Amino acid sequence: MKCEEIYRQFYHKDPEALSFCPYRISPLGAHVDHQNGKINGFAIDKGIYIAYSVKHNGVVELQSVNFEKRAQFHVASVPEFKEGDWADHLRGAAKALGEKYMLKNGISAVIEGTLPIGGLSSSASVIIAFLSALATANGINLGEWETIMMAKEAENRYVGVNCGKLDQSCEILCKKDALLYLDCKDDSYEIIGKKAMMQPFKIGVFFSGLDRSLSNSKYNLRADECKAAAYSLMAYAGLDYGKFEDARLRDVPREVYLEYADRLPENFRKRAEHFYTEMDRVNKGVAAWREGNLSRYGSYVFESGKSSVENYECGCPELISLYNILTDTSGIYGGRFSGAGFKGCCMALIDPDKAEEIEHNVSTKYLKEFPALEGKYSFHLCDTADGVRL
């Protein structure tokens, strides 16, 4: 790993340990986790590596293979507010860990992401890999759900991204060749193995060539629009409701939405329409997966992508074009935007025997439309993987 090589060059010794957290994809369950919906997910065999050693003076020294600026802070005095750089995610993680446990040791670390940034939950991956390293350095054994919620807290409270728990759950709970089926309302989940008779597949990741930052996108606005839709529907129906920030569409029966949808502002109605139809797609997709019907499962993934464009209104011209190309490419079972979907990448479940043909066809069509992205656009072939080992 390049992070180990850089660590040796910088510190003139080998790192004591290597922490790894995989990236994730979520074929179904787009944009519903923050509304306590249900999701599907896989961890993939690419992710974030951290080469590190313990520092007994409590100092955390961080540098990244992917970013130039270095970061340094003490575990006992993490900056109270974010500083606007890539290391905010790790400051937030250290702060969350330090609020629950006594931290004495820091780490010196070099961080490496194995794929371009955008759409695969790299922020959650780096937080979890860092939490695992810092906890280990302090003799702390974190549990799975403890880590999930602590990583989510770092993004929500410190970085300021109103994400749900989809990313963190996939990266920790997933198993190779199995689908994670998670209910974000009560945290119940099921790991559903791949049927022996199911068609073989791999995961194609198509990077648009555009970077993205959730904190600078409309991600938080969309989450608030969903809450506004839920709050309005509860008021129209005479349901009990509390604080706006606690409103979730999952708490509004679908029949209430159908009765009062025409009263909602168009943006709120579209967000709610996406939520309820996406919940249907998750449930139908799980049924198809249980039956071993990958083609039907993939068709729901394509439908999810269409609703993300039309109802959730995320995407940009480049990503929308990429999604449209996927829908018209032989050998792709299903695909859509990956992650927030404002820039970043698309993911697809593909026939491995047609991987080279798919890469050629998609790349040729996409770069013909956006030639300026030559050298920035990229394709990566991945497999499912186990979640992080804490």
Image (tube, rainbow, N blue to C red):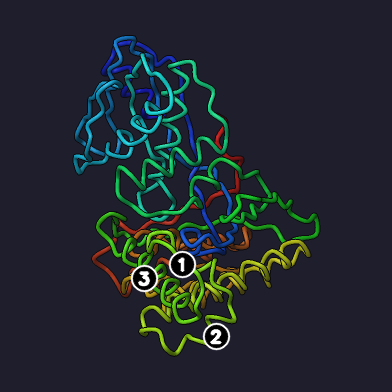
Which residue, given by chain and number where applicable, does mark 2 sit on? 258
Of discs 1 and 3, which sits in the foreground? 1
The answer to which quarter of the image holds residue 55 is top left
Q: Residue at x 47, y 74 (%)?
A: 234
Q: Which quadrant of the figure contains the C terminus?
A: top right
Given contact means CB atoms under 8 Å apart, are the residues at marks 1 and 3 in contact? Answer: no
**Whether residue 175 is situated above or below residue 61 in the rendered picture:** below
First-in-chain label (2 vs 1):
1
Q: Amino acid at mark 2?
A: Leu
Side of 59 where 223 appears, left or right = right
Which residue, given by chain and number where applicable, does mark 3 sit on? 225
Front position in the image: 4 or 83: 83
Residue 324 spot, x, y in % from top left:
44, 76
Counting labels gives 3
| Cα distance between the residues tagged 2 and 3 | 17 Å
Q: Within 10 angstroms of label 1, few (less than 14), some, or many (20 or more) residues?
A: some
Q: Amino acid at mark 3?
A: Glu
Q: Which quadrant of the figure contains the N terminus?
A: top left
Which residue, given by chain and number where applicable, does mark 1 sit on? 241
Side of 27 where 64 appears, left or right = left
Q: Within 10 angstroms of label 2, few (less than 14), some, or many (20 or more) residues?
A: few
| Cα distance between the residues tagged 1 and 3 | 16 Å
Side of 306 where 319 appears, left or right = left
Front position in the image: 205 or 161: 161
Q: Residue at x 69, y 64 (%)?
A: 286
